[in-house]
Structures are given as C-alpha cells and as structure tokens.
Amino acid sequence: MNKHKSRNRGTIFWKNLSLVLLITCIPIATISVILYYIGTDRIGTEVHNAHQNQLAQSIQHMEDYLSNLEHSVVRLAFDRSLDETLKQLDFIQEFQKTNELMKSFSLMVESNSLIGGVSLYLRDANKLISDDNGFQAVQSEEDKKLLESLLEKERTIYWNYSLRKIGTPDTMMKAIVIKLPGGQMYDSFGAFMIYLDQAKLNNMVQKLASGEGVAFLFNESGQYLTTPRTNEATIEQLTLEDTLRSRITEEDLNENTFKFDWQRQSYTVSYGKISKLGGKWTFVSATPLSQIVAPVTSLSRLILMISIFGLSIGLLLSWFASNKIYDPIYRLKRLFEAAKPPRSDEKNEIIYIENQWKEHLEEQQVLSTRIEESIPTLRESFLLQFLRGHLYTHTELELIDKMKQLDWDVEHKSFAVMVAQLHGISDLGGKFSERDAQLITFAASNILLELCSEKLNKVHVINFQDLSVGVFFVLDKSSTNEPLKATLNKLAHDFIAAVNNVLRLKVTIVTSKISDSILDTPNVLEQTRKALRFRDLHTSNQMLDMNQFMMDNTSQTHFPSDLEREIAHTVSMGLEEEAVRLIRQFMKELQSNDSTELMVHQGMMKLLGTLHDTMVKHDVNLYALYEGVHLYEQLMQLSEPEPIVEWFQYKLIRPFIKTLTMTYDGNLRETMEKLLTQIQADILKDVSLEMYADQLQMSSSRLSKAFRQMNGSNFIDTVIRLRIEKCKELLVTTDMKINEIAEQLHYQPSYLIRMFKKSEGITPRQYREKHSQER
C-alpha cells in the first residue's frame, strides 16, 4: 500500500522531500562517521593498553613469588645452624632440635604458596626429615641411589625438573636441591629438597590467560614447567603452545609482544624471561584478539546503533516535514488512492483529483442503487434472526434503530403475527409425498406473501420448512384494535381459501394478540406456534384467535387403557399387522370427544412409553436397535394421524419384531421352516391349520401365532399366496381351464378369480394372454 501511494505522489512532494533530507541527514551522517572512526580507534587503543598492563602486573606478581622463593633458598643454604653437627644428630634424643627443624620446614611451606613440600636428607645418618612425614630412615636401595645422585652434582644449588619424591614412586615433581654445607660443591653431608606445588604453579600461570587463550612456562631446555588443563585443553590449544614455544626458542625476537595467526584466528602473544636460582624460564601468554577487542566491538556497535538511530530520526523527521508541506494536496489525493488503484499516470495532482472526483460521483450513484436493491434481503435476514429469538440481547430502541437502517420505520407501530399449519397430505391419495413437504411449504409461503402484500405495506413471511408458515405484521396504531383484527381475519380466510383451491390441503391458522412492543414479538411468535397444537382434529379448516383462545381444563378426556395393554401384548407376541390395527383403533379413540391435536399427541406419547417398557422387558438393546435415535423427539415432529400410525409400524414395531424373531426359540424356527416347505409340497391338497397342528402335536392357536411370528403373515394368507403362485404356473405351462385349475386348488372359480385379481391386478385369463404374447 505504501509503495502504491509513493508512486502516485507528484513532483512537488519529491522536491520538498529531497531538500529536507539534505538539510537534516547530511550533518547527522557526518557526525556519526567521525564519531565511529575516531571513537572506536581511541577505545581500542585504551583497551589494548589496559590488557597489557594487566598482563604485566600478573607476570610481576609471579616473579615476586619466585624472588621470595629464591631468598628462602639462599637463606637456607647459608644458615650457620645447618652445619656438620647435623651428622651426629640423634633425632630421638635431641627431639627438641628435630622439632625445630620440622617447624622451620612448615613455616617455609606456609610463607610461599609455590612450595609444596620441604625435605632434608642426611647421608651419614641415612635419615630423611620432611614437613609432611616427619623423620624416617631411607630403606630402599633405589631411594638411596637417587639421594646419592643429588649430592654428586657439581652445583651447590640447582633445579631438578623430574625429581621423584621419596616414598611416592609414581610422582615426579619440580624441586630445588640445596647441598649442605652451603658454599661447598664436594663432600656434602646432606641436601635440602624444596618441592614446587605444580597445581599452584599451573594456576598462577593460567591466570595470565583468559577465555580461549593459553599461558605456559618452559625452561632453557624447552621443557614445559606447567602442565595443560587436561580437562579443558583442546588439541588445537596444545598444538598452539608447541608452535609458540618453537618460534620463541628458535627465533631471536626483539619485541616481547607480537601478533600470531593460528587456525584462522589472530592472537596477541606476550612473553618474558625470568632467571632465578640458576634456571632460565620463559613465560608465554597468547590471547585471541577478538577477546581483547570484545569491549571495543560492543562499544563500536553501540556507537553505530546510535548513529543509525540518529540517522533514522533524521529520515523520519524529514518524511514528517515533507508530508506537512505537501499535506493539503496529498490528503485529497490519498482519499482517492485508498479507495481504488489509480488508472492513469497523471503527474499533475490537480487534474488527477478532478478526474477521480468525477469517477467517485458516478460510482457513488451506482453503489446507492445497489444498496437500495439489497436492503430487502438484509431486512429479511435480520427479521429471521430476530423472530427466532437470536437477538434477545438487543433493547427495543436498538431494534427500532436497526429497522430504520433497513428502511422500515417501526416506531409508534403495532405488531402481530399469524401462523398457519397445513394438513392432509396423506388424504390426497399419494398426490404428494412426505418429501414434497418443503416444496409445499414454499408454495404456501408465496401465497401468503402475495395476499398480505396487497393489504399491508410491512409484511415478513417465515418459512418453517415443516408444512407451517408464519407472517410478521407491522401495523399502524389506531384508537381501537378492531379494524386491525378484522384485516387479519380477512387475510386468514383468503389464505385458507387459496390453499384449499390450489394445494388441496387443509389449514389451521392462529392469529396472535396485537402488541405495542416489538421486543415481545419473538415470544408472541413462539406462543402462537404452540397454539397450533390445540386445533380440533375433526375440523377441516380452523381459525384460532389468541385474544379469545383458552384451553378448556374442565373437559374429560377418555384414554383407552385397555387398547394400550392389548397393543403392548400384541407387540410382545410379534404380531405386526394386529398391532397396527389396534393402534389405528387407539388413534380413533383418542380423536373422539372433541380432542385437540395436543391431547392426541400426548396419548400417543404415553403409548410410546408403554411399548418402550414392553421392549425393555424382552432384554432388547434399544439404543443399538434404533441406532441411537431419539424416539420421542421423532414422534414430536409428526402431527397428522396417518403418519403417526405409519411411524409406529415401520420405525418402532417392525424393527423390534424382526429382532424378536431372530432371538426366538431355534427349534421352533426350524419346525416352522419345515412346515412351510411341507405346505409348498401339499399346496394342491386340501390343507388346514388343524391338520398340521395335529401332526406337530400342538394347539392350533399356538401354531398360528408361531407361524405368523416366524413368517410375517398368518397361515391362511400364506396358503392363498402359494396357491396364487401355483395358479400362475399352471396358467403359463398348461392349457387347463380356469375351472380345472380352481378345482385342483380347492377353490371356487369365482373366488379364485377375485383373489388372483386382488393379488396381481389382472384376471387369470389376462395373465395367460399376456405371457402367451411374451412367448
């Protein structure tokens, strides 16, 4: 959208924008660049100097420790109390002196953190005194040879970088050896061994490194005096240490600091040499440049972000100023661009606005026409939701305002509804089926709309899709409601006449009370629809007025309880046809004595409950049998007597009897199947139910019920059906006359002809002629 707007701005806007950008952004950009380069370079120099000073202080700290160690060694070497009298020292008898020696050793260890232990060896006494183990005799020959080799060295004070500590054969330590007496190279009677604490030495050197950097010590022979952090050091770091040691050892570098590239990363390397106690040590510290300049990078980014922010503010201010300058024309231009994309490349804003304004006026006229055409549809949708009670949260004023927006002024009006129910589809002899209910309802709603629109201006017809329609009236208020009632009654009479003549159906119409509040209309419509249940079933067409409608509570309604019990017994016996006959009789009993539809419906509901209890007693799973269907809800949807009876037969009783038959006694089923086969074989004989009852040794009534339950029809109907089939066979395959065939089937010819025609729809002679032509 922004891109589209920018493309439609004229040359005036872009000239103004360019000028403001030059005024605001160039100074800000210049200051930002100067600040970035000068500030970043200065900060980088200061950070690097601070790093070098910190490194120098750490090295000086380590050198102070070594100097302290050197002073302690020299003082110990030339201590006069450590003369040759120690040769004859009896450590046990002269315990006081022994204790003083051990205390001096402990004091030496505590005074310098680099000292890990102090031991004194006396060759003639073959004794060893240490700060941790006290005094002990040297036992093994290996230890004696090691100690003797220390006294054979030419130097009085020297370093041993792999001295095994006596008593711990697997430990190699760095130690300073001081031969006694001090100042003599030969004929030494003993020696001091000051062991360095390797862990503390490593820790002190590692403090020179930070992050991914390395720091180490090596002596004049190139041996490492520090050990790597085996848990943390990587192969790359160990290789870096070896490379740096080789370069510092082989090259004569004039500077103590240099840059070194390794593994695509630059390091700043600092090194120095320390000469203490006859040894020359070289310390090396290598730190990645990225780590040193990290604070500089952060500050540089901050400076860059501030500069970008300042430049962004300048751009925004420039944009804002340009829009303010261009605003009078641009506001008009934007109104048209927001509505639709431009269809021309006109650069002159005034001409562009003029053309767009003309198009806008034309479109406004078209849209106004379309809105007027769509208002009826919108009003129909709104009224449908309102009358169904979906807008119950609206107040009366809100409803009136909404109706005004939909071109219906309902303020200071009266309101009424009328509901019509169509009846008698089943009485038309198959002209309409239940599937045509929606089509019939649609036709009735059109008839009602046409009749009402002729007399009233504000009418809304509701199609309930179930053979019932309603109409909502907005009426002009009058001093009395009598003229309005007369108009509604006339419309009801006209509608009944039209439906009777066109659709050939009966109609029940209920007219509501006239209300002054639109808010009550959904409730009035609901009550009016419920009043349809109080129609008289014996009247073809009926009109009910809610103003005079009262339910007669004094009338006594006869309920056929005996028939109800007989129907339940018949259903439990599995006699479908008999049950249906009794249900029709039950329906007629309910319709007598001026019963209303509601009373009849309540009676049928009670019958459904009785049959429901009967089915439950047979241990039938009704939920599985009727596939979870709500039977009472289905029955509530029916209002005509014949559809109700058919629903009982096909939806309720037949599925139950079928299930009951499947669960019936297996032996009796097998007996009935054999009996049916025997009847087919004996069809030309004079058979009877009593004859077969005697053969099966059961009573005729029991056989009749079992036969009817298993086969779905009684014995006589089954025999007639089989004989009709045999008659059809003889008509097609033989030239026998009808009299002869009737004699073989044990029927009178006239009776046979009548039964044949009832079954096949044609006479036996016509049947034979038809099949002769086909052959």
Image (tube, rainbow, N blue to C red):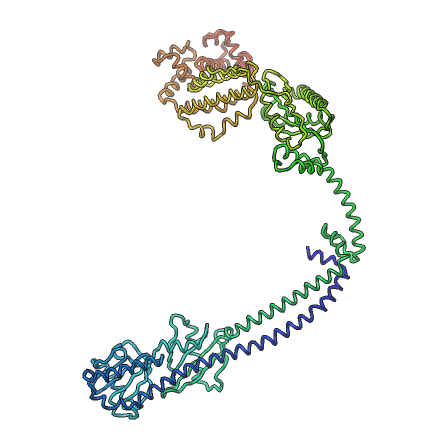
Q: Quadrant of the N terminus?
A: bottom right
Q: Toward the viewer: 191 or 769?
A: 191
Q: Toward the viewer: 247 or 187?
A: 187
Residue in the picture at 46% in, 77% down: 286
Relative to 557, say whether 481 is above or below.
Answer: below
**Residue 507 visible in image:** no
Q: Quadrant of the C terminus?
A: top right
Q: Toward the viewer: 532 or 448?
A: 532
Q: How many marks?
A: 0
* Residue 170, picture quadrant: bottom left
Could you tell me residue 445's position as x and y percent?
66, 27
Could you tell me residue 104's position as x and y percent?
29, 83
Residue in the picture at 18% in, 84% down: 93
Could you tell me residue 276's position as x and y percent?
38, 87
168 left or right of 379 in image = left
Of all residues, the one furthest to the left in this rendering is 93
Could you tell me residue 291's position as x and y percent?
50, 73
Relative to 377, say whether 685 is above or below.
Answer: above
